[in-house]
Image (cartoon, coloured by chain):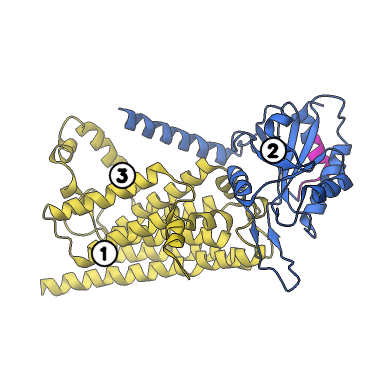
Chain colours: A blue, B yellow
Amino acid sequence: MPGLSHLKRGLLIGSFALVLLLSGCIGGDYATKGVYGLLPDLKFDLVSETGQRITEADLKGSTVVVFFGFTHCPDVCPTAMARLAAALDRVDQSIGEEVNVLFVSVDPGRDSPEMLGRYTDFFSEYIIGATATEPELREMTKRYRATFGFDEPDQFGNYNVSHPSAMYVFDGSSRARAIFRPADTISDMAEDLRRISGS
Amino acid sequence: MVTLNTVIDWLRPWEPSAPVIIVCAAAISLYAIGMMRGAKPGFWPALSFFLGMGLMYVVTQTQFDYYSQYLFSAHRFQHLILHHLGPFLVALSMPAAVLAAGLPASVRAWPQGRAAPVFSVLRVLYNGIQQPFLAAFLFVGILYFWLTPSIHFYAMLSLDLYWLMNWTMALDGLLFWWLIFERGRAGVTPRLSPGKRILLLGMIIPPQIALGAYITFSRQNLFDIYDVCGRAFPISPLLDQQIGGLITWIPASMMSVVAAIIVLAFRLEKTHARS
């Protein structure tokens, strides 16, 4: 009976997941937060800082760190980019997979490709800026269980944006491997980047 | 102005879940068929059943679910419905007889037919899990389990674990409130005295207050998953956490008081009926 086999499968997955949660063995063993098997593979269709279309196929074979932010961000984004640039400095890019960072702006109203190019160049040559329309960005963030939102603009048209603080790390086969959080140290981030990229 | 399109958009599921839609539709249909076949639950029990099922559907299969996934306070409200209010209303309506009347006669005969051994095992398991102190322990334990920050992180990050969390909350809520409101013809559920029911309701209050107060007064951002994934709109993480803590603390505990009053009212009704 197919219904019963689905039920059995559901119960089996549920019990297995509970056991893994209790034993703390979920997501893989990483210095940062392992998310192996918990999130879908990398997939996107965006406009890069050069104005060209960019998809996951363009970065196939390289380790990709995805960050959702915006260039007018006063604190979280510049700090995250600076920390990531420092971690990248500790990774030998000549060994193993190349490590690229995709800075996805969730504020397409203010972040043009040119502006994104200037912003990412300030931090590292390995950081690529990209964006898309709001519905496309919603679809992409939803895929990674993330979201963003906007405050009402003030009298000068400035507004705050809520966005994920995490950096999502995908291996060369586009599989989600780890999440870097603001509390993770630069050496832990570098250690996991080396491990995932094989450098 | 709220337009029809806005309402339709709001009613669309954020994460459609076939099992949730099927179970809700099946339960509501069976209940309605049972009534059409002559079962007479009365106006208030029927309203209680439909309201309970409807609330559980709304918090999981509309855009409300979006806020539940990206705001801790909305998540706590969702679980207040899934673990407390929704199952509370369903169990209060004691729908077993009406649902059974809605089933085809051949399905109603399963427990006495070839599947009898399976039902015997299920009865033993159900009876075991409904032992009063175990039921109270599970009711509070599951709250603590899913609100352990490291576990909560993965439950909100993985869609499969998210649904597992919501299902376990709803099922545990149904088991507990069923035990509290069980009445009428004796069945498989242990029949507790009113005093024992009120004792159980009293037992679950302090741990819920402790958990809610701990979250409310914590100066630390305990659930960083909401920063990691982003919040639905810009809001201070501590304010979001404090509202979530208050929902865990006050209305959740109040439900025990309301349930105790209902248990006493049933007892008084029985006494009046005898005299």
- The magenta stretch spans residue A133: no
* Above or below: residue B261 compared with residue A6: below
Tell me, yes or no, if residue A55 can be seen here.
yes
Q: Name the subunit of mark 3.
A: B
Q: Name the subunit of mark 2.
A: A
**Quadrant in the picture for residue B214:** bottom right
Q: Amino acid at mark 1?
A: Leu
Numbered disc 1: secondary structure: helix
Mark positioned earlier in the residue sequence (3 or 1): 1
Q: 10 Å neighbourhood of mark 3: few (<14), some, or many (≥20)? A: some
The quarter of the picture where the C terminus of chain A appears is top right
Q: Which residue is mark 3?
A: B126
Contact between marks 3 and 1 (CB within 8 A): the answer is no
Numbered disc 2: secondary structure: strand
**Quadrant in the picture for residue A47:** top right
- The range drawn in magenta is A183-191
Q: Which residue is mark 1?
A: B47
- Residue B46 percent coordinates (x, y): 23, 62
Q: Nearer the viewer, residue B192 or B163?
A: B163
* Above or below: residue B83 compared with residue A55: below
- Residue B180 percent coordinates (x, y): 31, 60
Numbered disc 3: secondary structure: helix
- The magenta stretch spans residue A189: yes
Task: Indicate left or right for B179 with A64 as reference.
Answer: left
Q: Nearer the viewer, residue B66 or A43?
A: A43
- Residue A160 percent coordinates (x, y): 71, 63
Q: Amino acid at mark 3?
A: Tyr
Q: 10 Å neighbourhood of mark 1: few (<14), some, or many (≥20)? A: some
Q: Which residue is mark 2?
A: A178
Between the C-alphas of marks 2 and 1, the distance is 48 Å
Tell me, yes or no, if residue B189 can be seen here.
no
